[in-house]
Amino acid sequence: MLSTGALRAHLLAARLAGPVATTRELSLRSYRLFAARDPRLLLGLDPEWVWGARDLLALMADRCGVSADPGHTSGCDVIDPERTLLALDAFADRLGRAAEARVPVLFGTGHPHRLLGFYAALADALSAAGCPVLTPAQGRSVDITTRFGLRTYNLDYVRGVALVREPGARPPGGETGAHTHSPLPVRTVLGALAEAGAPLPGLVVGDHGWVCGAGQLGFDAIGLADTDDPALFVGEAEGRVSVVVPLDDAVRSDYYRPLTRYVLNRACLSQ
Protein backbone atom coordinates (compact mmCIF):
# COMPACT_ATOMS: atom_id res chain seq x y z
CA MET A 1 0.00 0.00 0.00
CA LEU A 2 1.24 3.47 -0.89
CA SER A 3 2.02 5.30 2.34
CA THR A 4 0.71 8.77 3.12
CA GLY A 5 4.28 10.07 3.15
CA ALA A 6 5.05 8.59 -0.26
CA LEU A 7 1.86 10.02 -1.71
CA ARG A 8 2.61 13.45 -0.22
CA ALA A 9 6.02 13.35 -1.87
CA HIS A 10 4.43 12.37 -5.19
CA LEU A 11 1.86 15.17 -4.98
CA LEU A 12 4.66 17.69 -4.62
CA ALA A 13 6.98 16.15 -7.22
CA ALA A 14 4.21 15.91 -9.84
CA ARG A 15 2.92 19.39 -8.93
CA LEU A 16 -0.50 18.00 -8.16
CA ALA A 17 -0.19 20.00 -4.95
CA GLY A 18 2.27 22.55 -3.63
CA PRO A 19 3.03 25.19 -6.29
CA VAL A 20 0.82 24.20 -9.24
CA ALA A 21 0.63 25.26 -12.88
CA THR A 22 -2.65 27.13 -12.36
CA THR A 23 -1.79 30.80 -12.10
CA ARG A 24 -2.89 33.14 -9.35
CA GLU A 25 -4.25 35.50 -12.02
CA LEU A 26 -6.51 32.77 -13.41
CA SER A 27 -7.78 31.77 -9.98
CA LEU A 28 -8.59 35.35 -8.95
CA ARG A 29 -10.34 35.95 -12.28
CA SER A 30 -12.44 32.84 -11.68
CA TYR A 31 -13.46 34.09 -8.23
CA ARG A 32 -14.54 37.45 -9.69
CA LEU A 33 -16.57 35.76 -12.42
CA PHE A 34 -18.19 33.35 -9.96
CA ALA A 35 -19.10 36.28 -7.69
CA ALA A 36 -20.77 37.89 -10.73
CA ARG A 37 -22.75 34.63 -11.28
CA ASP A 38 -21.13 33.96 -14.64
CA PRO A 39 -22.59 30.58 -15.76
CA ARG A 40 -19.18 29.53 -17.09
CA LEU A 41 -17.91 29.43 -13.49
CA LEU A 42 -21.08 28.27 -11.74
CA LEU A 43 -20.83 24.86 -13.49
CA GLY A 44 -24.52 24.21 -12.91
CA LEU A 45 -24.55 25.31 -9.27
CA ASP A 46 -27.11 27.85 -8.07
CA PRO A 47 -25.50 29.18 -4.88
CA GLU A 48 -27.83 29.83 -1.95
CA TRP A 49 -25.45 32.26 -0.25
CA VAL A 50 -24.01 35.51 -1.48
CA TRP A 51 -20.39 34.96 -2.47
CA GLY A 52 -18.17 37.97 -3.10
CA ALA A 53 -14.70 37.61 -4.54
CA ARG A 54 -13.13 38.01 -1.08
CA ASP A 55 -15.50 35.41 0.38
CA LEU A 56 -14.41 32.99 -2.30
CA LEU A 57 -10.75 33.73 -1.69
CA ALA A 58 -11.24 32.98 2.02
CA LEU A 59 -13.09 29.75 1.17
CA MET A 60 -10.37 28.62 -1.24
CA ALA A 61 -7.68 29.45 1.31
CA ASP A 62 -9.52 27.24 3.80
CA ARG A 63 -10.30 24.35 1.43
CA CYS A 64 -7.22 24.39 -0.84
CA GLY A 65 -4.54 26.32 1.00
CA VAL A 66 -4.16 29.13 -1.52
CA SER A 67 -2.89 32.44 -0.18
CA ALA A 68 -5.64 34.39 1.58
CA ASP A 69 -3.88 37.68 0.77
CA PRO A 70 -5.86 39.60 -1.89
CA GLY A 71 -2.69 41.54 -2.60
CA HIS A 72 -1.01 38.37 -3.88
CA THR A 73 -2.04 38.67 -7.53
CA SER A 74 0.57 36.89 -9.63
CA GLY A 75 2.67 33.76 -9.92
CA CYS A 76 1.75 30.12 -9.38
CA ASP A 77 -1.13 29.23 -7.13
CA VAL A 78 -0.53 26.83 -4.24
CA ILE A 79 -2.45 23.81 -2.94
CA ASP A 80 -1.68 22.48 0.51
CA PRO A 81 -0.86 18.74 0.12
CA GLU A 82 -2.23 18.04 3.60
CA ARG A 83 -5.64 19.27 2.48
CA THR A 84 -5.38 17.08 -0.62
CA LEU A 85 -4.56 14.02 1.49
CA LEU A 86 -7.42 14.63 3.92
CA ALA A 87 -9.87 15.06 1.05
CA LEU A 88 -8.56 11.93 -0.69
CA ASP A 89 -9.26 9.97 2.49
CA ALA A 90 -12.82 11.30 2.60
CA PHE A 91 -13.23 10.60 -1.13
CA ALA A 92 -12.04 7.02 -0.66
CA ASP A 93 -14.28 6.50 2.37
CA ARG A 94 -17.31 7.61 0.34
CA LEU A 95 -16.39 5.18 -2.46
CA GLY A 96 -16.03 2.42 0.10
CA ARG A 97 -19.51 3.08 1.49
CA ALA A 98 -20.94 3.02 -2.04
CA ALA A 99 -19.28 -0.35 -2.64
CA GLU A 100 -20.63 -1.78 0.61
CA ALA A 101 -24.16 -0.68 -0.29
CA ARG A 102 -23.73 -1.66 -3.97
CA VAL A 103 -25.43 1.52 -5.12
CA PRO A 104 -25.57 2.52 -8.79
CA VAL A 105 -22.71 4.90 -9.62
CA LEU A 106 -22.28 7.42 -12.43
CA PHE A 107 -18.83 8.59 -13.54
CA GLY A 108 -18.28 11.62 -15.76
CA THR A 109 -15.38 13.89 -16.67
CA GLY A 110 -14.78 17.18 -18.41
CA HIS A 111 -11.06 16.37 -18.42
CA PRO A 112 -10.94 13.11 -20.42
CA HIS A 113 -7.39 13.66 -21.67
CA ARG A 114 -6.07 13.84 -18.10
CA LEU A 115 -8.47 12.12 -15.73
CA LEU A 116 -10.14 9.35 -17.71
CA GLY A 117 -7.76 6.68 -16.44
CA PHE A 118 -8.27 7.73 -12.82
CA TYR A 119 -12.04 7.46 -13.01
CA ALA A 120 -12.01 4.32 -15.17
CA ALA A 121 -9.96 2.43 -12.58
CA LEU A 122 -12.45 3.44 -9.89
CA ALA A 123 -15.36 2.39 -12.12
CA ASP A 124 -13.74 -1.00 -12.72
CA ALA A 125 -13.25 -1.53 -8.99
CA LEU A 126 -16.79 -0.52 -8.04
CA SER A 127 -18.22 -2.70 -10.79
CA ALA A 128 -16.21 -5.65 -9.47
CA ALA A 129 -17.60 -4.91 -6.00
CA GLY A 130 -21.16 -5.22 -7.31
CA CYS A 131 -22.07 -1.59 -8.01
CA PRO A 132 -23.96 -0.99 -11.27
CA VAL A 133 -21.89 1.53 -13.27
CA LEU A 134 -24.45 3.54 -15.22
CA THR A 135 -24.00 4.35 -18.93
CA PRO A 136 -27.29 5.90 -20.13
CA ALA A 137 -27.92 8.17 -23.12
CA GLN A 138 -24.86 7.03 -25.06
CA GLY A 139 -24.70 8.83 -28.39
CA ARG A 140 -27.26 11.45 -27.40
CA SER A 141 -26.51 14.98 -28.62
CA VAL A 142 -25.91 17.86 -26.21
CA ASP A 143 -25.73 21.51 -27.33
CA ILE A 144 -23.16 23.39 -25.25
CA THR A 145 -22.33 27.09 -25.41
CA THR A 146 -18.58 27.59 -25.78
CA ARG A 147 -16.34 30.59 -26.40
CA PHE A 148 -16.71 29.74 -30.09
CA GLY A 149 -20.52 29.75 -29.95
CA LEU A 150 -23.02 26.93 -29.67
CA ARG A 151 -21.46 23.53 -30.37
CA THR A 152 -23.07 20.11 -30.55
CA TYR A 153 -21.36 17.22 -28.77
CA ASN A 154 -22.25 13.56 -28.39
CA LEU A 155 -22.29 11.67 -25.11
CA ASP A 156 -20.03 8.65 -24.98
CA TYR A 157 -18.62 6.24 -22.40
CA VAL A 158 -15.11 4.85 -22.15
CA ARG A 159 -14.67 2.08 -19.56
CA GLY A 160 -17.79 3.26 -17.77
CA VAL A 161 -16.82 6.95 -17.68
CA ALA A 162 -19.04 9.50 -19.43
CA LEU A 163 -17.53 12.22 -21.59
CA VAL A 164 -18.52 14.29 -24.59
CA ARG A 165 -16.88 14.41 -28.01
CA GLU A 166 -17.40 16.33 -31.20
CA PRO A 167 -19.42 14.39 -33.77
CA GLY A 168 -17.10 12.50 -36.08
CA ALA A 169 -14.00 13.37 -34.05
CA ARG A 170 -13.32 9.75 -33.07
CA PRO A 171 -15.29 6.52 -33.22
CA PRO A 172 -17.41 5.80 -30.10
CA GLY A 173 -15.28 4.29 -27.36
CA GLY A 174 -12.15 6.16 -28.50
CA GLU A 175 -9.83 7.45 -25.84
CA THR A 176 -10.17 11.18 -26.48
CA GLY A 177 -12.98 13.56 -25.71
CA ALA A 178 -13.70 17.24 -25.32
CA HIS A 179 -12.79 19.44 -22.37
CA THR A 180 -15.96 20.92 -20.90
CA HIS A 181 -17.20 22.63 -17.76
CA SER A 182 -20.87 22.34 -18.71
CA PRO A 183 -23.52 20.73 -16.46
CA LEU A 184 -25.68 19.91 -19.51
CA PRO A 185 -24.18 16.43 -20.07
CA VAL A 186 -25.02 15.24 -16.54
CA ARG A 187 -28.49 16.76 -16.76
CA THR A 188 -29.02 14.89 -20.03
CA VAL A 189 -27.83 11.61 -18.53
CA LEU A 190 -29.93 11.94 -15.37
CA GLY A 191 -32.95 12.98 -17.42
CA ALA A 192 -32.57 9.90 -19.62
CA LEU A 193 -32.53 7.65 -16.55
CA ALA A 194 -35.63 9.31 -15.14
CA GLU A 195 -37.48 9.05 -18.48
CA ALA A 196 -36.70 5.34 -18.68
CA GLY A 197 -37.73 4.71 -15.08
CA ALA A 198 -34.25 3.26 -14.52
CA PRO A 199 -32.38 3.28 -11.19
CA LEU A 200 -30.81 6.65 -10.43
CA PRO A 201 -27.23 6.96 -9.17
CA GLY A 202 -26.59 6.70 -5.48
CA LEU A 203 -23.26 8.42 -6.14
CA VAL A 204 -21.89 10.64 -8.93
CA VAL A 205 -18.11 10.86 -9.30
CA GLY A 206 -16.29 13.31 -11.54
CA ASP A 207 -15.35 16.95 -11.97
CA HIS A 208 -16.60 20.29 -13.27
CA GLY A 209 -20.27 20.31 -14.32
CA TRP A 210 -20.67 16.57 -13.69
CA VAL A 211 -20.31 17.15 -9.95
CA CYS A 212 -21.96 20.56 -9.60
CA GLY A 213 -24.81 19.70 -11.95
CA ALA A 214 -25.55 16.48 -10.08
CA GLY A 215 -25.17 18.06 -6.65
CA GLN A 216 -27.53 20.89 -7.58
CA LEU A 217 -30.17 18.28 -8.46
CA GLY A 218 -29.80 16.60 -5.06
CA PHE A 219 -27.52 13.69 -5.96
CA ASP A 220 -24.64 12.64 -3.75
CA ALA A 221 -21.59 13.88 -5.67
CA ILE A 222 -17.83 13.81 -5.10
CA GLY A 223 -14.97 14.96 -7.27
CA LEU A 224 -11.70 16.69 -8.00
CA ALA A 225 -11.13 20.42 -8.49
CA ASP A 226 -8.35 22.91 -9.16
CA THR A 227 -7.90 26.32 -7.58
CA ASP A 228 -9.72 28.03 -10.47
CA ASP A 229 -12.89 25.92 -9.99
CA PRO A 230 -14.52 27.53 -6.92
CA ALA A 231 -17.98 26.14 -7.74
CA LEU A 232 -17.22 22.67 -6.38
CA PHE A 233 -15.91 24.08 -3.11
CA VAL A 234 -18.91 26.37 -2.79
CA GLY A 235 -21.11 23.33 -3.39
CA GLU A 236 -19.26 21.52 -0.63
CA ALA A 237 -19.55 24.49 1.75
CA GLU A 238 -23.30 24.75 1.07
CA GLY A 239 -23.85 21.02 1.47
CA ARG A 240 -24.63 20.03 -2.12
CA VAL A 241 -21.30 18.38 -2.90
CA SER A 242 -20.09 15.74 -0.46
CA VAL A 243 -16.33 15.73 -1.04
CA VAL A 244 -13.97 17.83 -3.18
CA VAL A 245 -10.31 16.92 -3.55
CA PRO A 246 -8.12 19.98 -4.24
CA LEU A 247 -5.42 19.24 -6.82
CA ASP A 248 -4.16 20.30 -10.23
CA ASP A 249 -6.59 18.63 -12.61
CA ALA A 250 -4.50 19.00 -15.77
CA VAL A 251 -1.13 17.31 -15.23
CA ARG A 252 -0.03 14.21 -17.15
CA SER A 253 -2.54 11.38 -16.91
CA ASP A 254 0.01 8.90 -15.53
CA TYR A 255 0.69 11.21 -12.58
CA TYR A 256 -2.75 10.31 -11.17
CA ARG A 257 -1.97 6.57 -10.96
CA PRO A 258 -0.50 6.72 -7.43
CA LEU A 259 -3.68 8.53 -6.34
CA THR A 260 -5.72 5.70 -7.86
CA ARG A 261 -3.78 3.09 -5.90
CA TYR A 262 -4.07 5.09 -2.69
CA VAL A 263 -7.83 5.62 -3.04
CA LEU A 264 -8.55 2.00 -3.95
CA ASN A 265 -6.50 0.74 -1.03
CA ARG A 266 -8.13 3.17 1.37
CA ALA A 267 -11.57 2.18 0.10
CA CYS A 268 -10.69 -1.54 0.40
CA LEU A 269 -11.33 -1.93 -3.33
CA SER A 270 -7.89 -3.10 -4.48
CA GLN A 271 -8.03 -6.21 -6.64
Image: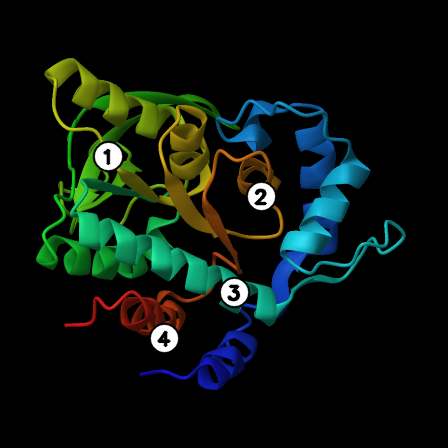
Neighbour class for label 2 at 10 Å: few (<14), some, many (≥20)?
Answer: many
Which of marks 3 and 4 precedes in the sequence?
Answer: 3
Tag 1: amino acid: Pro
Which of marks 2 and 4 precedes in the sequence?
Answer: 2
| Quadrant, the N terminus | bottom left
Separation of residues labelled 1 and 2 (CA atoms): 21 Å
| Quadrant, the C terminus | bottom left
Question: On the image, numbered disc 1 is attached to which residue?
Answer: 201
Tag 4: amino acid: Pro
Residue 49 image point, x, y percent: 67, 25
Question: On the image, numbered disc 3 is attached to which residue?
Answer: 86
Report if the CB atoms under discs 4 and 2 are less than 8 Å apart: no
Question: On the image, numbered disc 2 is attached to which residue?
Answer: 233
Rendering quarter of residue 47: top right
Pick the residue in front: 191 or 217. Answer: 217
Neighbour class for label 4 at 10 Å: few (<14), some, many (≥20)?
Answer: some
Q: Is residue 4 above or below residue 191?
A: below
Residue 34 visible here: yes
How are the residues colored? rainbow
Rendering quarter of residue 265: bottom left
Tag 2: amino acid: Phe
Residue 189 image point, x, y percent: 24, 27
Question: On the image, numbered disc 4 is attached to which residue?
Answer: 258
Q: Which mark is residue 182?
A: none
Q: Viewer-nearest of labels 4 and 3?
A: 3
Tag 3: amino acid: Leu
Separation of residues labelled 4 and 3 (CA atoms): 15 Å
Separation of residues labelled 3 and 2 (CA atoms): 15 Å
Residue, far right: 71
